[in-house]
Amino acid sequence: MSQLDVAVGYATARKGVPAPASFRRWVEAALKGARRRKGTELSIRIVDADEGQSLNLQYRGKDYATNVLSFPAELPPGVDLPLIGDLVICAPVVTREAAEQGKKAADHWAHLTVHGTLHLLGYDHIDDAEAETMEALETRVLAGLGIADPYETV
C-alpha cells in the first residue's frame, strides 16, 4: 500500500480506547478492502458524549451522541492532497453499544473505524442497494481481521 498517515487525537479518557496502531491497522484494512492504492491521510478524534452530541447536532441536526461521524475532505479544485477527511468516534457510545450488542469492545471499535473510513471513500447506506454493498464490504474487511459479521443478529 502507498503512504498512509492516520492521526489519532484523544479528547476523552483513554481507558478502554484502542491505541493509534489499532486504528491505523483498521483504516489500512478498509482501504485495502476498497482497493485504494493511493497515498491516504485522515484524522480520527476520539470524543466524549458531550462533544459527540454537539457535533452530531451541529452537522446532522440530531441532538444525541452517535457512534461515528465522517467528514469527507472537500478540497478546492487544483489542490491535490491525499487527505480523505476526518472521523469522530464517541468513546462512551461505542462502549455502550458493544455491551448492548454482546460484542467485544475492540471488535466494535474496529467496525466503526472501517465503517467511517468507507464513508470517507464515498460509500454510503442511504438506500438499500448502497447499504448492501457497503455492509458486504465491511463484513469482508472485518473477516480479514478475524472479526465476526457485525450485522449478523443473534
Image (tube, rainbow, N blue to C red):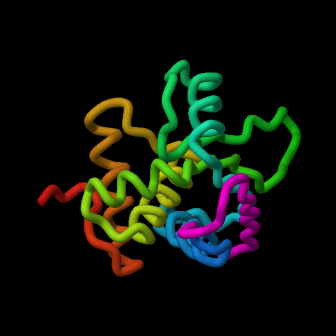
Please provide percent x and percent y for residue 127: 32, 31
Q: Against 132, is 141 above or below?
A: below
Q: Measuring 32% from the left and 63% from the top, which residue is drawn there?
A: 139
126 or 57, nearer to the observer:
57
Q: Measuring 41% from the left and 67% from the top, which residue is drawn there?
A: 105
> Left or right of 18: which side holds 135?
left
Q: Against 137, is 104 above or below?
A: below
Count how many numbered circles sit on residues in the image: 0
Q: Against 140, is 47 above or below?
A: above
Q: Measuring 57% from the left and 42% from the top, which residue is drawn there?
A: 49
Please provide percent x and percent y for residue 8: 72, 62
Q: Is residue 108 visible?
A: yes
Magenta span: 1-17
Q: Is residue 39 visible?
A: no
- Which quadrant would residue 15 be assigned to in this image? bottom right
Position of the N terminus by quadrant: bottom right
> Left or right of 90: which side holds 103?
left
